[in-house]
Image: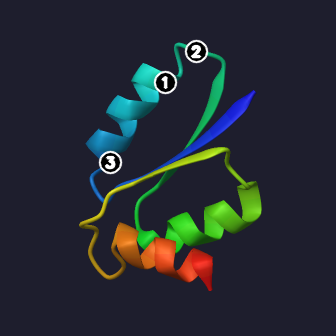
Amino acid sequence: MTKILIADDKPEVVELVRAILEDEPHQVLGACSGEVALKRIREEKPDLVLLDVEMPTMSGFEVLKKLKE
């Protein structure tokens, strides 16, 4: 089963994408901030990560930068 993490500060966006993706055999995880996304990426090791680039406190770009470190 493919594990997908959706990171967005708007819960309605996470739920919309989750509803679309869960029709297929995917495990869909959510994160409400960049910090939570980093933690879940390190713990869950998702196959695919969808990041909002304009989240407050830590943008999707900052999450990517921290993952590269």
**Residue 33 place in picture, x, y as percent:** 41, 67
Are dots 1 and 2 in contact, CB under 8 Å? yes
Query: Upstream in the sequence, badge 2 or badge 3?
Result: 3
**Residue 13 place in picture, x, y as percent:** 29, 41
Q: Could you say which quadrant of the image residue 43 lies in?
A: bottom right
Residue 69 position (above or below residue 63): below
At label 1, counting other C-alpha atoms closer than 10 Å, the crowd grade (few under 14, some 14-19, many 20 or more) is: some
Q: Could you say which quadrant of the image residue 4 lies in?
A: top right
At label 2, counting other C-alpha atoms closer than 10 Å, the crowd grade (few under 14, some 14-19, many 20 or more) is: few
**Residue 55 place in picture, x, y as percent:** 28, 68
> What kind of residue is marked 2?
Glu
Query: Mark number for residue 24?
Result: 2
Q: In this rendering, which labeled residue sits more in front, label 1 or label 3?
A: 1
Query: Upstream in the sequence, badge 1 or badge 3?
Result: 3
Are dots 2 and 3 in contact, CB under 8 Å? no
Element under disc 1: helix
At label 3, counting other C-alpha atoms closer than 10 Å, the crowd grade (few under 14, some 14-19, many 20 or more) is: few
| Location of mark 1 (residue) | 21
Q: How many marks?
A: 3
Task: Name the foreground residue: 4 vs 29.
Answer: 4
Alpha-carbon span between mark 1 and mark 3: 15 Å
**Residue pictured at 32% horizontal, 82% vertical:** 57
**Residue pictured at 47% horizontal, 73% vertical:** 63
Residue 17 position (above or below residue 8): above
**Residue pictured at 53% horizontal, 64% vertical:** 37
- Please identify the quadrant where the C terminus is shown: bottom right
**Residue pictured at 38% horizontal, 35% vertical:** 15
| Location of mark 3 (residue) | 11
